[in-house]
Image: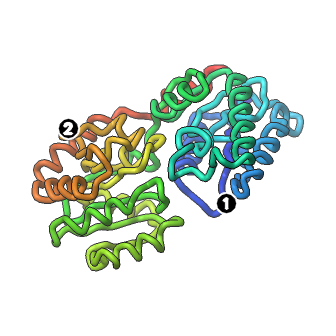
Amino acid sequence: MRKKRVAICFPSVPFIKGGAEHCVQSLYQEMKKREYDVEIVSVPFQWDPKDEVVKNMVVWRMLNLERIAGNNIDLVIATKFPSYIIKHPNKVTWLFHQHRPVYDLYGTCYSDFKASNPSDVRIREQIINADNRSLPESKGIFTIANNVSNRLLHHNRIKSTPLYHPPLHYSKYHCEEYGDYILSVGRLETLKRVDLLLKAMKHVEKSVKCVIAGTGGMESYLKSLSKELGIEDRVKFIGFVEEEELLKLYSGCFSAFFAPYDEDYGYITLESFLSKKPIVTCRDSGGVMEFAEHNINSKVADRADPLIIADHINTLYRNPDLCKKLGNSGYNKVKGISWDNVIKQLTSTI
């Protein structure tokens, strides 16, 4: 009996690696372990100029993955926009996120789509119409977090089921100590709000250090901001780090800062908790709040205020025992998340 053939559809962005890329690679590896014949089918995603988004949608719609080289594809797993626009008789969608600038970010400073621009309005309508037509074609609609499911229901009136999954290297995170630095991990982009951490660092105890791992479009600005704030001697930008160094960084920090705006899911939350470290976050950080509980496993700021964040950082830095207590609680919150249920649900139609 032949192995079941599965195509994971993913719109990649060349030269950029983030949580979505790690998730797809993990899904691929985990399905391989479970004896599926699986491949990742990727189309480069381009969003500038905006008309390129529509072209991407057309490309995905035109792809035919029913049969390749004389072999049937038993299942297509679509992920983030616009991969779920593909047609297949056994399509399942595990939604990472839609094109957020036309949905939950529309009308905010984080979206470049303007209601006053007729071209933007036209393209936005095309995207929403395509979503409303293609997503219900799926035999199952799942998401990576309840926050993504809520957006889908609110904007498109489409129901879905959240499937939580563990982060990359999920079995290797550990705790060695609660050291003298707070850790920030991830892409340096506007939505991640690393600038909040830097502004908070101006108001924390001078012995507190900050390590920022990651690269992105905001890197130059953030480095300039640290100099402007007079904290560059306590803030270390280390760029992209490999697995071994990342695990070591988590194992030695006293806390991690992760306060993005309305995050889809948020690996950093799980990575911190698996390392038995509390996080500092904000009430409006979206998927993070599906795990973070103030004074239970985290410190949660009611608003994105550097002074409030600084106070939380100081509290954790001064109290290693509190860090340990909150970190252990966080670990217990997420330790049971595994790939077994995810893959069982995604492959239930074959």
The residue positioned 57% from the left and 58% from the top of the image is 17
Q: Quadrant of residue 329?
A: top left
Which element is circle 1 on? loop
Give the residue number, with chain letter if any, for mark 1. Answer: 14
- Along the viewing direction, whichever of 53 and 277 lies nearer the viewer: 53
Instruction: Of the two numbered discs 1 and 2 on the same chain, state the one appearing first in sequence.
Output: 1
Q: Is residue 5 visible?
A: no
Q: Is residue 313 visible?
A: yes
Density class for disc 2 (Cα within 10 Å; few <14, some 14-19, many ≥20) is some
Give the residue number, with chain letter if any, for mark 2. Answer: 296
Taking the image as shown, residue 344 lies to the left or right of residue 135, namely: left
Density class for disc 1 (Cα within 10 Å; few <14, some 14-19, many ≥20) is few
Q: Amino acid at mark 2?
A: Ile
Q: Position of residue 245 (x, y in %)?
A: 38, 65
The residue positioned 76% from the left and 47% from the top of the image is 56
Task: Give the colour scheme shown.
Answer: rainbow
Give the farthest residue toward the right.
70
Q: Position of residue 295 (x, y in %)?
A: 18, 40
Instruction: Count the labels in the image.
Output: 2
As displayed, is residue 303 above or below residue 182? above
As displayed, is residue 181 above or below residue 93? below
Give the farthest residue toward the front.
116
Which quadrant is home to the N terminus?
A: top right
- Along the viewing direction, whichever of 312 and 121 lies nearer the viewer: 121
